Amino acid sequence: MNSSNTTFYKNTKSLEDPNIFIGDTGATCYTTNSKDDFCIIKKVTKYDNIVDASGNNIERTVVGDISNAKCNKVGREVKNVIIKDIVHIPRTGCSLLSLTKRLDQ
């Protein structure tokens, strides 16, 4: 593939939608800036501590589970899935799905 043919979105505003998760191989947990869709909310414990790449502790408020629809490539719902233990970080710009954690599960 020629890299000059690769197209990237110039407007990243849609990535702020809490229903869109970005797959991240470096993330150790699932994170979101919205807790509106949490079907189960749990208190944060010391095990939910998050440290960024610079070594800073990240503010988090709650941990929860989200029930969501899994869709095929044309947008048709295939089945319902539950993503567990998503850490709510109010100041994050987007929702991250830890691909490493997902593979372990």
Image (cartoon, helix red, strand yellow):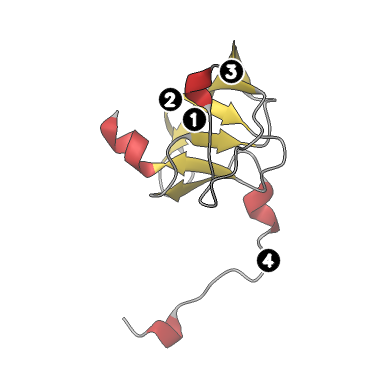
| Residue at x-position 59% and y-position 68% | 9
Q: Nearer the viewer, residue 78 or 32?
A: 32
Q: Amino acid at mark 2?
A: Val
Q: Residue 81: which numbered mark, if any?
A: 2
Nearest to the eye among marks 4 and 3: give it: 3
Pointers 1 and 4 in contact (C-beta within 8 Å): no
On the image, numbered disc 4 is attached to which residue? 11
Residue extending farthest to the left is 104
Q: Residue at x 62, y 46 (%)?
A: 94
Mark-to-mark CA distance, 1 and 4:
25 Å
Label 1 or label 3, whichever comes before in sequence order: 3
Gap between marks 4 and 3 measured at Cα: 33 Å
SS class of the residue under badge 4?
loop
Label 1: element kind: strand
Q: Nearer the viewer, residue 57 or 35?
A: 57
Query: In the image, what residue type sits under mark 3?
Result: Val
In this figure, which residue is indicated by the disc labeled 1? Answer: 69
User: How far apart, in angstroms, are the residues tagged by discs 1 and 3?
Assistant: 26 Å
At x 59%, y 44%, the residue is 56
CB of mark 2 within 8 Å of CB of mark 4?
no
Mark sitting earlier along the chain (1/4): 4
Label at residue 44:
3
- The image quarter containing residue 104 is top left
Q: Earlier in the sequence, mark 2 or mark 4?
A: 4
Mark 4 or mark 3: whose residue is earlier in sequence:
4
The amino acid marked with disc number 4 is Asn
Q: Between residues 58 and 68, which one lies in front from this camera angle?
A: 58
